[in-house]
Amino acid sequence: DQQVKQNSPSLSVQEGRISILNCDYTNSMFDYFLWYKKYPAEGPTFLISISSIKDKNEDGRFTVFLNKSAKHLSLHIVPSQPGDSAVYFCAASGNYKLSFGAGTTVTVRA
Amino acid sequence: NAGVTQTPKFRVLKTGQSMTLLCAQDMNHEYMYWYRQDPGMGLRLIHYSVGEGTTAKGEVPDGYNVSRLKKQNFLLGLESAAPSQTSVYFCASSYQRGYNEQFFGPGTRLTVL
């Protein structure tokens, strides 16, 4: 029973445009949310996070939005760059364990 | 600092064989985790440890055992490998409770024939 869902397996976006990745969760006990980025043959690397007491967190080109009532979060990448082509995992934290979504593969077209 | 390292990077086993995957971290982290990644499934937690000498089951523990004899090392064992254990295995560590970010190793690709 997956508690974190990323319903879009892939996303293709033109360089310079906005990428929007979505994530839904079911467990209301989750109190911290993270996005990880993964290149082929490498481990996931931390990208950005947000606490459940906030609704927005920004770090450079990356912004994460949290809507607790809808149990939904999104990651915005503006502007998208070729190096952003990767798999992005949404994760939710509860009791020091992370639950991951299935991932969204982002392809940035030149 | 090397961060989180995993040994080996690749391995092919026959059904019924055993092996141990080694994870090491040099960040003095208390918590360590083993995940497996399968297509369309994301990362699923196999076992984890909240400190030296402690281990606990995660979401998919069957067929695996772990040990944490030293703080910096976390071993994942397969006693009798099955084709269903073909996967990419990731080790991760985090500083302590309350620090949510986990740092991942590069992964071990295991194929069981």
Image (cartoon, grey):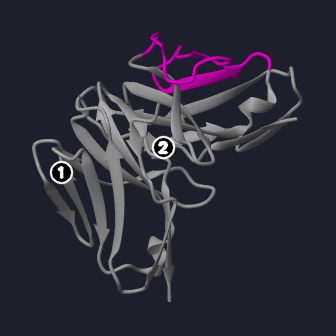
Foreground residue among B36 and A60:
B36
Instruction: Determine whether A49 is above or below A86 in the image.
Output: above
Most common secondary structure along the magenta stretch = loop
Foreground residue among B25 and A75:
A75
Instruction: Determine whether B52 is above or below A96 in the image.
Output: above
- B26 with respect to A64 (left or right): right
Per the model, the C-alpha gap separating discs 1 and 2 is: 28 Å
The label on residue B108 is none
Q: Residue at 16% of width from left, 44% of height from top?
A: A69
The residue most toward the front is A70
Circles 1 and 2: CB distance less than 8 Å? Answer: no
Q: Pinpoint the chain carrying mark 2.
A: B
Local SS, label 2: strand
Indicate the position of residue B43 as horizontal and vertical percent values. 52, 40
Q: Classify mark 1: residues with Cα within 10 Å, few (<14), some (14-19) or many (20+).
A: some
The label on residue A67 is 1
In front: mark 1 or mark 2? 1
The boundaries of the magenta stretch are B52-80
Amino acid on which the number 1 mark rests in the picture:
Asn
Amino acid on which the number 2 mark rests in the picture:
Phe
* Image quadrant assignment for residue B90: top right
* Image quadrant assignment for residue A56: bottom left
Q: Residue at 37% of width from left, 79% of height from top?
A: A80
Q: Residue at 13% of width from left, 53% of height from top?
A: A55
- Residue under pointer 2: B104
Indicate the position of residue B76 as horizontal and vertical percent values. 63, 23
Q: How many marks?
A: 2
Are labels 1 and 2 assigned to the same chain? Answer: no
Instruction: Determine whether A107 is above or below B88 in the image.
Output: below
Instruction: Determine whether A110 is above or below B73 in the image.
Output: below
Indicate the position of residue B98 as horizontal and vertical percent values. 23, 30
Q: Pinpoint the chain carrying mark 1.
A: A
